[in-house]
Image (spheres, rainbow, N blue to C red):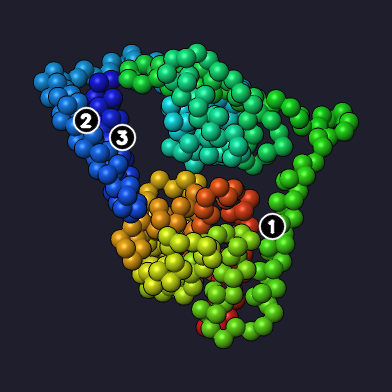
């Protein structure tokens, strides 16, 4: 079973690399030889490693897991979930496999949402690279590590993260067990005393969100719009620049119609006109939001095809160097009026959960303004 799972992971990694190579077709012509060399290397890897491995597996077969082993695994899972300390089980790329009850309370992230996503994505941006590096070192067998990080939702509170290698029974790869503890400021006690000093950065970000909400409300109420598309364009201009590098607006639900696309003035790889001419039905992210009516927040989007392709056939998310995105349906009484998609690119700080909540509030106001024109 361990050999089969290891082969499956290797094959899945190969498929992901192939997808990256497909997306790399949009690189400048001078860089194409490097892409070609990489593709040849991947083909050699299949011929020399994956295929012989597959033949060995099919020849020898695999053994099942005994009933006693399954009972022991269930017991260990129960103990893990009920540990009083915040504990997470991650892989070498910091992807969360399990998050216990204490960790969900500590981080404010539901276990179902965290599973399958990198734990580094829930940390403040400056801490992510160091956390990924230390996790990889522990998984390689370089010994236990510890470092101080900050959660994205509570950047003022330092968190002490202890990492140790763990080899789960019957699994081929080493996992990493992470224990999280508050390393600095503590919550005020019941006996009173001074509380933690307010964080100026967090206060500034909150004030900026309040200013954005005020600007959006003012824009929607200042003068009567003549059409639903005009409402979308007015809202997009409020969000453009101060909140997102790219703002793309689509009207409708069953039949989506692109009305506005605003991007950076110095963007050379992708033009706003190209996105405005794009068919929103070719953007899986937009179609899913229009059908499901739920907001999507992605940091370092994994699927390069999530927002379709531009006129040259290259993935939009790759060409625009999108590092985080928000796709927000404009919903009123359960009915989707349209979809707003926001991109942040390059080194800009990724969208936070607080910003996603503020955008969700603004989306209801925009949908209400659009509905009044029916």
Report if residue 50 is visible in the image: yes
Q: Which residue is mark 3?
A: 13
Taking the spot 19% from the left edge, 26% from the top edge, the residue there is: 49
Quadrant location of the N terminus?
top left
Q: Which residue is mark 2?
A: 45
Q: Position of residue 315 (x, y in %)?
A: 36, 56
At mark 3, the secondary structure is helix
Q: Position of residue 71 (x, y in %)?
A: 37, 17
In the rendered image, the residue lying farthest to the bottom is 226
Taking the spot 59% from the left edge, 20% from the top edge, the residue there is: 146
Taking the spot 74% from the left edge, 27% from the top edge, the residue there is: 184
The residue lying toward the viewer, choosing from 359 and 33, is 33
Q: Which is more N-terminal, label 1 or label 2?
A: 2
Instruction: Work out how far the residue at label 2 is from the one at label 1, CA to CA, in angstroms.
Output: 49 Å
Q: Position of residue 134 (x, y in %)?
A: 52, 24
Give left or right: position of 85 versus 257.
Answer: right
- Which callout, 3 or 2, points to the residue nearer the camera? 2
Instruction: Work out how far the residue at label 1 is from the one at label 3, CA to CA, in angstroms.
Output: 39 Å
Q: Position of residue 162 (x, y in %)?
A: 58, 20
At mark 2, the secondary structure is helix
Taking the spot 53% from the left edge, 39% from the top edge, the residue there is: 121
- Crowding around mark 3 (Cα neighbors within 10 Å: few <14, some 14 to 19, many 20+) is few
Answer with the quarter of the image where residue 243 lies. Answer: bottom right
Answer with the quarter of the image where residue 55 lies. Answer: top left
The residue lying toward the viewer, choosing from 98 and 147, is 147
Q: Which mark is residue 209?
A: 1
């Amino acid at each position: 079973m361990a050999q089969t799972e290891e082969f499956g992971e290797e094959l899945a990694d190969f498929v992901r690399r192939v997808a990256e190579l497909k997306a790399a077709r949009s690189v400048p012509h001078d860089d194409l030889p490097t892409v070609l060399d990489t593709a040849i290397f991947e083909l050699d890897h299949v011929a020399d490693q994956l295929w012989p491995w597959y033949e060995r597996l099919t020849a020898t077969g695999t053994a099942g897991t005994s009933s006693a082993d399954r009972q022991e695994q269930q017991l260990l899972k129960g103990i893990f979930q009920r540990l009083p300390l915040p504990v997470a089980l991650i892989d070498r790329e910091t992807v969360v496999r399990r998050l216990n009850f204490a960790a969900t309370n500590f981080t404010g992230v539901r276990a179902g949402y965290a599973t399958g996503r990198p734990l580094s994505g829930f940390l403040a941006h400056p801490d992510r690279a160091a956390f990924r590096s230390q996790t990889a070192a522990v998984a390689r067998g370089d010994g236990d590590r510890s470092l101080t990080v900050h959660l994205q939702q509570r950047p003022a509170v330092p968190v002490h993260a202890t990492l140790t290698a763990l080899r789960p029974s019957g699994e081929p790869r080493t996992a990493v067990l992470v224990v999280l503890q508050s390393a600095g400021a503590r919550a005020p006690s019941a006996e009173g005393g001074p509380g933690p000093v307010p964080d100026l950065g967090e206060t500034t970000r909150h004030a900026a969100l309040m200013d954005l909400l005020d600007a959006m409300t003012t824009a929607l109420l200042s003068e009567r719009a003549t059409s639903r598309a005009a409402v979308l364009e007015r809202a997009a201009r409020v969000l453009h620049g101060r909140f997102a590098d790219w703002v793309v607006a689509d009207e409708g639900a069953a039949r989506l119609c692109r009305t506005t696309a605003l991007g950076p003035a110095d963007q050379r790889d992708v033009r706003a006109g190209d996105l405005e001419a794009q068919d929103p039905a070719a953007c899986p992210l937009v179609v899913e939001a229009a059908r499901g009516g739920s907001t999507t927040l992605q940091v370092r989007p994994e699927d390069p095809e999530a927002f379709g392709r531009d006129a040259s056939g290259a993935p939009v998310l790759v060409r625009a160097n999108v590092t985080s995105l928000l796709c927000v349906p404009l919903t009123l009484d359960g009915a989707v009026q349209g979809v707003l998609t926001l991109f942040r690119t390059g080194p800009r700080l990724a969208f936070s959960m607080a910003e996603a909540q503020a955008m969700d509030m603004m989306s209801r106001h925009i949908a209400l303004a659009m509905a009044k024109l029916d």
